[in-house]
Image: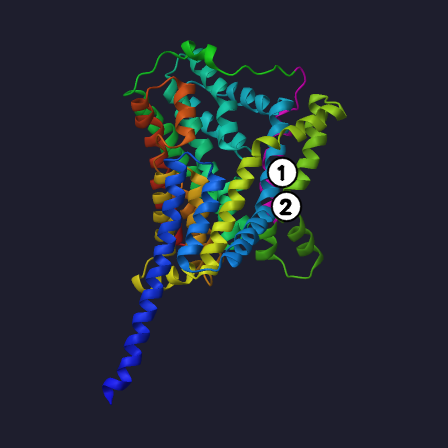
Amino acid sequence: MLSSLSAPLVQAATAWTAHDTRLLSAAVAGIAVIVLLISWAKLHPFLSLALGATTLGVVAGMPFGDLVDTFTEGLGKTVGDVGLLVALGAMLGKLLTDSGGADQVVETVMRRTTSKTLPWAMVFIAALLGLPMFFEVGVVLLVPVVVMVAARTEQPMLRIGIPALAGLSILHGLVPPHPGPLAAVDALHVDLGLTLALGIVVAIPTAIVAGPVFGSYISKRVELPPATHLLGKSPEQEEQPHRPSFFAAVAMLLLPVVLMLCKSVADLALTEDTLGYTILDTIGTPVVAMMLTVLIAIVVLGRGARFSRNRLSDVVGGSLPAIAGIILIVGAGGGFKQTLVDSGVNDTITDLASGAHLSPLVLGWLIAVGIRVATGSATVATISAAGMVAPLVMGLPPAQGALVALAIGSGSLFLSHVNDAGFWLVKEYFGMSVGQTLKTWSAMETILSVVSFAVILLISTVV
């Protein structure tokens, strides 16, 4: 009789294990397809993510009609939540660049620095300019500045360049409104203002270690040609005869950060349904904060540069084509995440992580590291890892959820190498060999990832 009772239990356990194994195999197959298509076939990440989601759904046993609906639903929701913020951020960055506001910030800071403080000034400049700009745009903008400063002060290129790259890269990985952090916040349903605030706290010590400290160390061990040899390679910039003031440019850079933090302040300090709470909660909503900033920047920066209405329209409109690909990639990542959820893979990963007592912080960082090293894309790594650990974040305190988003962003920075477009961009602009780029840029990215994760773990023991 005991055997007759135990037989169904054994069969049920066996069936559950087989189903569980199938779902895990589906997740591995989906990620493997994405990695192979991006790294080996050189297919665009948007198509790679779409085909990876298809593979995952098919292996998991989803009906094809449901799979299409799931992917498009996830894509549409993510583009609606994140795509608008990415577009508004691109508009703000373009306004700052074309009005001369970015140049004004750089030149004002440089006039107040000495040769000893130059690396620290470069971190500050890169971090300030990097808030609304994508990494590639920031590199193109800052390289002429790095070359000019290194040539004038006769400093090694790496002593000036590494801090600038560190300041840009850490913001790209951790701080909204960059696409990766925004996608992580959306996938994990964590507080954006809190994530932004904690991201800045994590970014400061990380940028110091990977920037001025590592830059001073590596510049003595990797010799590059004098910066004067690179002056001809720098992209030429149109001289803007009229510029907004330094304070106007900095105010536009910091305004979205301040507005987004207002929502967190309201949640912590004010009672719901009061007038003050409603106002702060509204202007602190990310879309509203970015929209207000762009509208104010059109007036402040446009007037400072004496742009006509037609020129302003061209500047704002000209920012959008460059980020169409980014929005599609982020959207496809949302479709992949939704496929993970609807196929049941997320629940399986949650059960396994709970049984193994794996921290969501550690799991998110490790998954992001693996996908980053394999695909070379920080954004793809962030989106994929966030989709897989999202169930583990449910029920966590707000600060812990925000730290999981930051841990994923931290892992997405690990070891940029030859499959990363940023690797080649830095190599060519700085005139380095592949070996020199690995010793400098790749090492710096790894330091950013490891140090930021250590800071995140430290903060998680306190908050």
Q: Which amino acid does label 2 sit on?
A: Val
Q: Mark 2 points at which residue?
A: 287
Q: Which of 459 and 84 is in front in this view?
A: 84
- Residue 327 at what x, y percent from top left? 56, 40
Question: Secondary structure beneath disc 1?
Answer: helix
- Residue 440 at what x, y percent from top left? 33, 26
Q: Name the residue under label 1.
A: 88
Q: Which amino acid does label 1 sit on?
A: Leu
Residue stretch rendered in magenta on the structure: 241-262
- Residue 148 at what x, y percent from top left? 47, 14
Q: What is the C-alpha distance between the residues marked 2 and 1?
A: 8 Å
Q: Do the residues labelled 2 and 1 touch (CB within 8 Å)?
A: yes
Disc 1: CA contacts within 10 A as few (<14), some (14-19) or many (>=20): many
Is 164 placed left or right of 280 in the picture? left
Q: Residue at x 41, y 23 (%)?
A: 161
Most frequent secondary structure within the magenta stretch = helix
**Residue farthest toward the bottom in the current orientation of the protein:** 1
Name the image quarter holding the N terminus. Answer: bottom left
Name the image quarter holding the C terminus. Answer: bottom left
Is 140 placed left or right of 317 in the picture? left
Q: Which of 68 and 145 is in front in this view?
A: 68
Q: Residue 413 carries which label?
A: none
Question: Secondary structure beneath disc 2?
Answer: helix
